[in-house]
Image: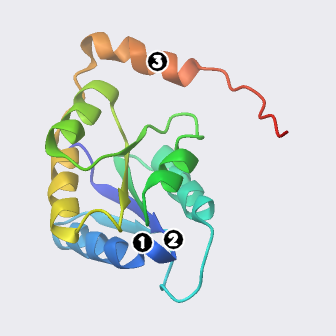
Amino acid sequence: MIFDRLAIGADHRGFWLKKTLAEHFQSVGYEVEDCGVSNDCEAVDYPDYANKVAEKVLTLKKCFGILVCHSGIGMNIAANRHKGIRAVLLIGEEMMRLAREHNDANVICFGSGFIGPEIAIYISEIFTTTEFKDSRHKTRIDKLDQSCSFPVKHD
């Protein structure tokens, strides 16, 4: 098994899809680390939950992450700010397979406003069963992890 743990998090707009995905993965034997949010009643800031999931993925063995917000975009941006995280925002089977095979993606981001639970589960299952083909792609992944960060300018 490539992964046996899932760290999952969402903001208030992604709560219900997160809940469904967490229940699914728990039912098929994954250890699920729920990093919040615990309800959909109060607006929260997505970076807080992206940071929690990224930390778990980076520190726990055989752990992948799922992040959910309304569009998936904010979570994707926030997660990818962590060195070693390769988060992807995908809606299709072939893209998910390539994200694992070529990019060794370790976090999936979903937009709850754009994808339903059945497709999200299906795509996630592809993610968890697709091996990274490290041949020529490993060099590229290493370059991502060695990238320097540039200061952010605010005008």
Camera-nearest residue between 95 and 56:
95
Residue 11 marker: 2
Identify the image quadrant of residue 31. Answer: bottom left
Residue 100 marker: none
Percent position of residue 66, x then y: 38, 57
Q: Is residue 139 above or below residue 126?
A: above
Query: Which amino acid type is shown beneath numbered disc 3?
Result: Asp
Camera-nearest residue between 130 and 98:
98
Identify the image quadrant of residue 15. Answer: bottom left
Q: Is residue 100 above or below residue 1?
A: above
Where disc 2 sits, the SS reads loop
Label 2, label 3: how far apart the Cα atoms are: 31 Å
For marks 1 and 3, give the one nearer the viewer: 1
Label 1, label 2: how far apart the Cα atoms are: 5 Å
User: Would residue 25 be found to the left or right of residue 152 on screen?
Assistant: left
Residue 142 marker: 3
Camera-nearest residue between 96 and 25:
96
User: Would residue 92 be found to the left or right of residue 77 on screen?
Assistant: left
Badge 1 density bin: few <14, some 14–19, many ≥20, Cα 10 Å = many
Query: Which amino acid type is shown beneath numbered disc 1?
Result: Gly
Q: Quadrant of the C terminus?
A: top right
Residue under pointer 1: 14
Query: Which amino acid type is shown beneath numbered disc 2?
Result: Asp
